[in-house]
Image (cartoon, rainbow, N blue to C red):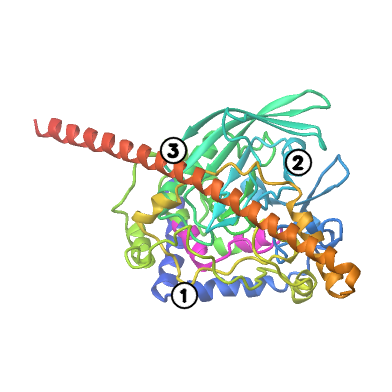
Amino acid sequence: MTSGEETGKSVMNVETVYREVNAKNGWASFYQNIRSECESFDYTCNESKKPQNKTLNRYRDVAPYDHTRIILKRGVCDYIHANLIRVDHAERQYILTQGPLPNTVSHFWLMVWEQNCRAVLMLNKVIEKNQIKCHQYFPLDDVKPTMTFEDVSIKVDFISKKESSDYTTRTLRITDLESNDSREILHFHYTTWPDFGVPQRPTAFLRFLADVRKSGALDQNVGPPVVHCSAGIGRSGTFCLVDACLVLIEKCGLNALDVRHELLAMRRSRMGLIQTPEQLCFSYAAIIQGAKQLPFDNMDLNNEITHDEIITTYDEMNNKSNHPLEKDDEPPPLPPPRGESLTRSIMADLSSDGSTDNDEAGGPPDKPLPSEPPNHVELSDANLSTSATNCVDEQNLDDGTVLDETLSDDAENSIVTNNSPSNLDAKGEVRRRKTEKKERLATQVREMKRRQKEMEERQKFKRSKSETTESGESVHKEAESTI
C-alpha cells in the first residue's frame, strides 16, 4: 500500500467517526464522554494555589498541572500559568498558556526568551463581548515600538507587520538586557476566532496553520511555540490537536488515526483542552479537510474547496443562516464556574474563594470561566467581519489594577465589620476610590472600543478591496477562456 493510499484510508476512518457522530447529532455526548474520562486524572495543581501565585491566574477553575508547568529560571518568581504539551510521536511540542494579565506580562516574555521560542500564536482578541480577555502585552506598531520590562531585564521591539483577512503576522525583536543578546520573534494573531466558538469554516484556519508551519515556528530545532487564547485551553487546544493529528497522518501514513485518543493524551499535560462540542466537531472537520491538502508545502492557500462534501456538511450542521454570531457589544452570558478536567477535590480548592465580576479589574483567582453561549455554533458572514478586528491598545491600563481592586475589597470588608464613627470617613474614602477606579476603567474601555472600531473599518476596507480585485481577475480569466 502506498503512503497516499494509507493517508486516504486514515482520513476515511476519521471521516467515518465524523459522519457517524454527526448523523446522530451526538457531538455533545461524544464530548461529554471525553470530559468524564478525564475526571479520573489525579494530577496536582499545588503551585497555582499558593497565596503568592493566586493573583497570577486569570480564571479560578483553570490551573496548570504541576508535572508539566513551565518553570521560570530567573526573577523573584518561578511560577507562570503555562504547561508544556509534548506529542513525541508527532515530533511536536507546544507551550499553552493563558492570555497575559497586567501583572504577568513580564513573566510571559521571560518565558518566551528562556524557552527559545520562535513564535507566539495569539488566538483571541484583547476585548471580546465587552470584556478584557487579554492584556495588551506586545507593541502594536511603530507608534509605540518598544516595551521594556525592568523586573526581568527583557525588552520587546516592534519591527514590522503583515495583515491578512483573518490574521496579522508581526515580527518582533526580544532582547535580554543582561547579556544584550537578541533574536526575532514572530507573533501570529488570529483575529476572527470567537470565544467558545469556532472559525466559520476550516479553510481559513488551515491557511493560518500553513503559514505558521512555513515560518519554521513548529520545527524541532527551535523552542516550542507559545499558544494562547484567554484561558489557554479551548481555542489553543483546538489548534494543537489539529496540527498534531495532521502531522501524524502525513508522517506515518496511519491506517487509523484515533483523534479522541490524541486529545485525551494531550489533556494529561494541560486540563480542559477543547472546551465545547463545537470545537471538537471543528477539529475533526479541519483534520479531514487538512489531510486532503497534505503536504502543506503544496497547499493552495487561495483554494476554498467550497464544493467539498465535508465543508458542505459542516456548514449545514452549523446552520449559519439561522444562528448569527454573537456581536461583541452584546452583554456577556452569566458566568457559572466550569472546570474542564478538574477532579472534585481540585475544583473545591480552586473555587473556595467565591466569584467576582468577570473583568480585568477583578481578582483573577475569584474569576471563573464564562459560560458557553446558549446556541451551538453561531456563525454568519455578516457578523464575521465584525469579529475580524485586531487587538486594541490597552497599554494605558494601570498594571496594578488587579491587586488594587483586591485590596479595596478587603479594606471595605474590614470597615463594614467595624462601623465605629472613627471609621466612617475611611469607609467613604474607600467608596470614593472605587467609584473613581470604575469611572477610569470605563473611560479606558470606551477609548479601546473606539480604536477597535477604527481597526474594523480598515479591515473591512481591505477585505472589500481584496474581493473586488479577485472578482476582476475571475472575470478576466473567464473572458480569456471564452475567447
Question: Between tags 3 and 2, which lies in front?
Answer: 2
Q: Residues within 10 Å of mark 3 (few under 14, many from 20)?
A: few
Q: Residue furthest top?
A: 180
Q: Which residue is mark 2?
A: 106
Q: Residues within 10 Å of mark 1 (few under 14, many from 20)?
A: some
Q: Quadrant of residue 342?
A: bottom right
- Identify whether 165 is placed above or below 18: above
Q: Quadrant of residue 424?
A: bottom right
Expressed as whole percent of the image width and height from the top left, the position of residue 228 reads: 63, 50
Q: Amino acid at mark 1?
A: Gly
Question: Between tags 3 and 1, which lies in front?
Answer: 3
Q: Which residue is mark 3?
A: 164
Q: Which residue is mark 1?
A: 26
N-terminal of the pair, mark 2 or mark 1, is 1
In the rendered structure, which segment of residues is drawn in magenta? 263-285
Expressed as whole percent of the image width and height from the top left, the position of residue 456 reads: 43, 44
Q: Amino acid at mark 3?
A: Ser
Q: Is residue 277 magenta?
A: yes
Q: Residue at x 73, y 46 (%)?
A: 399
